[in-house]
Image (spheres, rainbow, N blue to C red):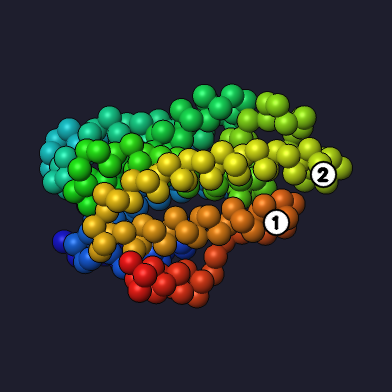
């Protein structure tokens, strides 16, 4: 099964860093990664649309359930490719259900005031993606905790980077507890720069702790897989460094590495190994 133009466009439009890094996976793995991300990006697009499209999401979810239960193609190429991948690689159906629940939470919940609640959302929206990826790459079970942690760390830096975008969608994933802040809107943050700096430092420190734990699992990755995963991880760390230098930058633009930076890091990781 080749990567369709639809999968290519869907993945490319959703994640510059991971899309460009994934181009360096071996062909069969690259196809599976595109089929995975095609499914998760389409589901995410329903809930992140402005306005959100809950009916579209529920139709998508219900169609997946019918396709999974029937064991035969449903006619939706994004869903059919994912179901084929899930069966072939032995994905736990509970992982997909956790992902779909997290997407539905974006339709019903806007604020997360406790870390425990944020982590519940992260499990379904990101940690299970790490578990899917571990199965795609046929990693040993020992790699699963690190795969989950990498998904958690990457999602957390996205929360920090996307503060302005998420506020525009009526969402705040990062708890304010213990930071001295009452809210995160730009005008308020600029009037309380020291508190906002402390808030960002607090959450970046947590991200880097989780990132370090995740990278301990890179020893389980064969070299042909380590280069794209390492590169994506490096680029998320780069994003964190830019924000740490000037936290208010998150209100001015979306901090993301350009394609040339990603490719340069890929080349470096390819040479260094």
Q: Is residue 261 above or below residue 34?
A: below
Counting every numbered tag in the picture gives 2
User: The residue tagged with tag 2: helix, strand or loop?
Assistant: helix
Q: Are the two marked residues, 1 and 2, in contact with CB atoms closer than 8 angstroms?
A: no
Quadrant location, the N terminus: bottom left
Q: Is residue 242 visible?
A: yes
Q: Is residue 10 visible?
A: no
Q: In the rendering, at what x and y percent does residue 156 appear?
A: 53, 42
Q: Is residue 8 left or right of residue 54?
A: left
User: The residue tagged with tag 1: helix, strand or loop?
Assistant: helix
Q: In the rendering, at what x and y percent does residue 219 appear?
A: 30, 51
Q: In the rendering, at what x and y percent does residue 269 appear?
A: 38, 68
Image quarter for residue 135?
A: top left
Disc 1 vs disc 2: which is toward the camera? 1
Classify mark 2: residues with Cα within 10 Å, few (<14), some (14-19) or many (20+). Answer: few
**Nearer to me, 264 or 183:** 264
Q: Is residue 205 left or right of residue 34?
A: right
Disc 1 marks which residue? 245
Q: Is residue 224 left or right of residue 38?
A: left
Q: In the rendering, at what x and y percent does residue 267 appear?
A: 39, 74
Image quarter for residue 223?
A: bottom left
Q: Earlier in the sequence, mark 1 or mark 2?
A: 2
Q: Residue at x 43, y 41 (%)?
A: 213
Q: Is residue 56 left or right of residue 139?
A: right
Disc 2 marks which residue? 193
Q: Residue at x 22, y 52 (%)?
A: 137
């Amino acid at each position: 099964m080749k990567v369709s133009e639809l999968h290519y466009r869907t993945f490319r439009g959703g994640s510059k860093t991971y899309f460009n890094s994934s181009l360096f996976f071996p062909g069969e793995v690259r196809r599976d990664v595109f089929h995975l991300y095609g499914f998760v990006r389409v589901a995410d697009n329903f809930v992140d649309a402005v306005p959100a499209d809950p009916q579209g999401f529920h139709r998508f979810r219900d169609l997946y359930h019918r396709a999974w239960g029937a064991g035969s193609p449903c006619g939706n190429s994004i869903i059919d490719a994912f179901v084929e991948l899930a069966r072939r690689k032995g994905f736990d159906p509970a992982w997909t259900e956790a992902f779909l629940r997290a997407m539905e939470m974006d339709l019903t919940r806007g604020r997360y005031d406790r870390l425990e609640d944020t982590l519940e959302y992260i499990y379904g929206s990101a940690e299970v993606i790490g578990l899917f990826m571990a199965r795609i790459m046929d990693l040993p079970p020992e790699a699963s905790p690190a795969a989950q942690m990498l998904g958690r760390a990457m999602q957390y830096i996205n929360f920090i980077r996307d503060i302005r975008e998420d506020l525009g969608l009526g969402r705040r994933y990062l708890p304010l507890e213990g930071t001295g802040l009452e809210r995160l809107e730009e005008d308020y943050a600029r009037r309380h720069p020291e508190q906002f700096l402390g808030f960002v430092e607090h959450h970046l420190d947590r991200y880097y702790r989780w990132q370090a734990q995740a990278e301990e699992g890179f020893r389980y990755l064969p070299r042909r897989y380590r280069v794209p995963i390492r590169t994506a991880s490096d680029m998320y760390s780069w994003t964190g460094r830019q924000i740490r230098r000037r936290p208010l930058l998150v209100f001015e633009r979306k901090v993301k590495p350009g394609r040339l930076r990603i490719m340069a890091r890929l080349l470096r990781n390819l040479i260094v190994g």
